[in-house]
Image (spheres, rainbow, N blue to C red):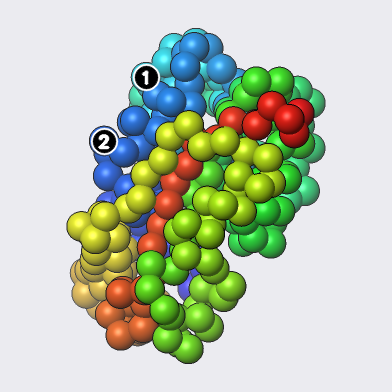
Amino acid sequence: MKHERISGLAHAERPVRAPLDDEAVQRLLARGLPRGDERVLDLGCGSGEWLLRALTAHPGVHAEGVDVSGDALDLARRAAAARGVAGRLVLHRQEAAGFEASRPFDLVLCVGSGHAFGGLLPTLAAARSYLAPGGRVLLGDGFWADTPSPEAFGIFGELDDLATTVDRVVAAGWTPVEGHVSSRRELDAYEWACWGSLASWALDHPADPDAPEVLATATARRTEWLHHYRDSWGFVTLVLRRTPEFR
């Protein structure tokens, strides 16, 4: 089964593909959209839930999303039509790192997709290239909440602790104006939902030839989480503005 199909099944009950609850998403979007008529870009938008919520809450917002998954973008199109916002949403199926925009954006999102650009600072540099003067970036990325095991390091690679992560963002010329550190409840809810959704699909479709692979994937990912990174991996989401001396 293709990776994008696995991801779609895992996130069937988690349209926001990150460990944040609805209140946190609403608060971060409100800080990122102070006027309510902004142009918004999501790099690695998945099924587009951040954009859909922005469009639904703000009738003056127009948005574009970029993702490599055709399945996820199809979900976004159907959801946009159901919510009556399809006329204000443009979706692009391609690598986020190669996207070329015709106009700048007031808010650029990249939540959990920094791997597409090679890490935290390259993601910020890419976001800046799309940003209109006075615009904002909404960035979500992982950090080490505790010393990682070798297995956790192998899964997530080079990360800093929370303070160092924010320090690096600030040193790169950005000022946080809002932030959210995912709680243990949010992190656990996200993991249980993802791997539980995968397992449920496999158990509900025992005759499907992909069912054994899907169930094995759910088991492996749940085991990685519980045994290797549950106590060491964290997630932070920041709303950023350019620091004046770096403009």
Q: Residues within 10 Å of mark 1 (few under 14, many from 20)?
A: some
Q: Dividing the picture into quarters, in which one does residue 241 lie? A: top right
In-image side of 96 versus 73 (left or right): right
Residue at x-position 52% and y-position 73%: 156
In-image side of 22 versus 174 (left or right): left
Q: Does residue 150 lie above or below 5 as drawn?
A: below
Q: CA distance from mark 2 to mark 1?
A: 13 Å
Give the residue number, with chain letter if any, for mark 2. Answer: 23
| Observer-nearest of 178 and 139 | 178
| Observer-nearest of 234 and 57 | 234
Q: Does residue 93 lie above or below 199 as drawn?
A: above
Q: Is residue 75 visible?
A: no
Residue at x-position 68% and y-position 40%: 173
Mark 2: secondary structure: helix
Q: Is residue 152 visible?
A: yes
Q: Position of residue 48 (x, y in %)?
A: 47, 39
- The image's mark for residue 57 is 1
Q: Dividing the picture into quarters, in which one does residue 80 lie? A: top left
Give the farthest residue toward the bottom.
150
Q: Position of residue 82 (x, y in %)?
A: 36, 27
Q: Position of residue 78 (x, y in %)?
A: 43, 35
